[in-house]
Amino acid sequence: MPELKPISREAIPAAIAKAERYRLLNEPRAAESICRDVLRVDSENQEAIVLLLLTLTDQFSRQMRVAVHHAQEVLPRLKDEYERTYYAGVICERWAKAQLERGAPGYAAYEWFRKAMESYEKSEAISPPDNDDAILRWNTCARILKRNDQIRPKPQDQSIQAGFEDEVPYR
């Protein structure tokens, strides 16, 4: 197995720009690799951490190579509480969309959309002035839920005994 080569600290800004371009070209694995190279040199680079998180979520719908917990493991590395709660919502929202693309039951996606919306509400409460990103994402989720009748809460299991008036146990 070949040994990874480190990049120079001076190359970090250009590497981050290149990772952003790879994301735009729909090449999240290349962008992820670049982010990991940046983080090997500067493990606290917040821009690279956010970009890594996004590249992981870009891969959710690609044959499940990346699972939701892979992106969630990156969250604690974000120093800012607003960013942690906001990106927790992004992870949940993108996982919900990936579930829909895979044909999962609507209730599975619904639960993830609700988690996303809860995170967006928390981040809205602590958002910096003039930053309505959390509101914009919350509204997107709300519109998706309104437009798709298949995305609903999981039906409650109905007991076999439902409808019996007496207290005699079902046999």
Image: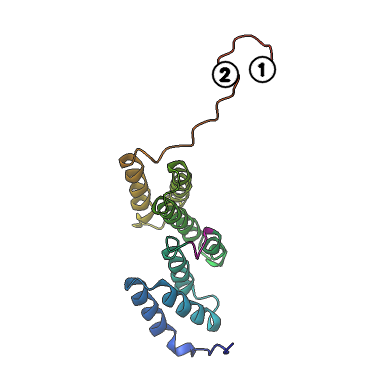
- Say which amino acid is labelled 1: Tyr
Q: Which mark is residue 153?
A: none
Where is residue 133 drawn, in percent x and y? Answer: 36, 56
Describe residue 97's horizontal placement relative to residue 168 as left or right: left
Query: What residue is disc 1 on?
Result: 170
Which residue of the protein is positioned furthest toward the front in this rendering?
A: 171
- CB under 8 Å between callouts 2 and 1? no
Q: Secondary structure at mark 2?
A: loop
Where is residue 89 drawn, in percent x and y? Answer: 45, 54
Residue shown at 42% from the left, 77% from the top? 30
Where's the N terminus, which quadrant?
bottom right
Q: Residues within 10 Å of mark 2 (few under 14, many from 20)?
A: few
Where is residue 12, by image quadrant?
A: bottom left
Residue shown at 49% from the left, 71% from the top? 49
Residue shown at 36% from the left, 42% from the top? 145
Query: What residue is disc 2 on?
Result: 162
- Say which amino acid is labelled 2: Ala
Q: Nearer the viewer, residue 3 or 86?
A: 3
Describe residue 106's horizontal placement relative to residue 166 as left or right: left
Q: Nearer the viewer, residue 139 or 2?
A: 2
Q: Secondary structure at mark 1?
A: loop
Q: CA distance from mark 2 to mark 1?
A: 10 Å
Q: Residues within 10 Å of mark 1 (few under 14, many from 20)?
A: few
Q: Nearer the viewer, residue 76 or 30?
A: 30
User: Magenta span covers which residues?
Assistant: 64-68
